[in-house]
Amino acid sequence: MAVQLDEAEKQILGALLADFTERQLDAQQLKKLYEGPKVSNLISAICSGGDITTVDFDIAFDDLAKKKLIRTGPWRPYENKPGSGLIFVGGYSLKEYACLTEIGYKTARQAPNRPAKAQRIVNNLHISGGQFTNLQLAAGEVVTQKMQSNAGADSDLLANLISILEK
């Protein structure tokens, strides 16, 4: 069954497909709830062009979830009130991130469902004022930096710098 998508739905699926392929995930990830891009990042990437509003995004996002083309997470169990006679069993999504399903992946790969202009999720950083030289800068959720010095003239210099910094 071919699924007809509007431009906002195509943009969302296209962004999720681009993220999925850039991260080089495999088919097993489509079967379970992997942690995809944050919904807030999707909104900023897709709604930045002006063609798609946040209302369009919200409607398209909900439609994709109803069609089981995407999933959201993380999941939280319902919290029942203590002493309540009514007990709910189940959970709900916090809708912090989105990911493709197998059906969503297949749909996004079809030619009629590719967006006219694919939007990528880009994190921008703006620094103003001052002069920056030899600046190491990292942005993101997981950043690791390591500095290592081998024996020689540089190791003495490094030891002196560390002692100055410790004081």
Image (cartoon, rainbow, N blue to C red):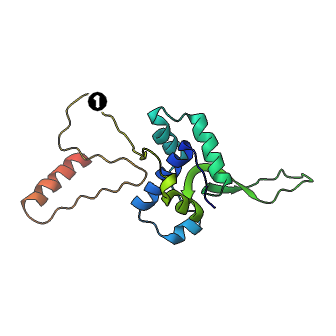
Q: Nearer the viewer, residue 25 or 132?
A: 25
Q: Nearer the viewer, residue 139 or 116?
A: 116
**Furthest-bottom residue in this view:** 28
- Residue 17 in the image: state x and y as whole percent: 47, 57
Question: Which residue: 81% across, 60% down?
Answer: 89
**Furthest-top residue in this view:** 129
Residue 26 vertical position relative to residue 96 in the rendered view, above or below? below
Q: Nearer the viewer, residue 66 or 139?
A: 66
The residue at which mark 1 appears reads as 128
**Furthest-right residue in this view:** 85
Question: Which residue: 68% across, 53% down?
Answer: 66
Question: Which residue: 8% across, 64% down?
Answer: 152
Q: Nearer the viewer, residue 45 or 167?
A: 45
- Residue 11 in the image: state x and y as whole percent: 50, 46
10 Å neighbourhood of mark 1: few (<14), some, or many (≥20)? Answer: few
- Residue 23 in the image: state x and y as whole percent: 41, 61
Q: Amino acid at mark 1?
A: Ser
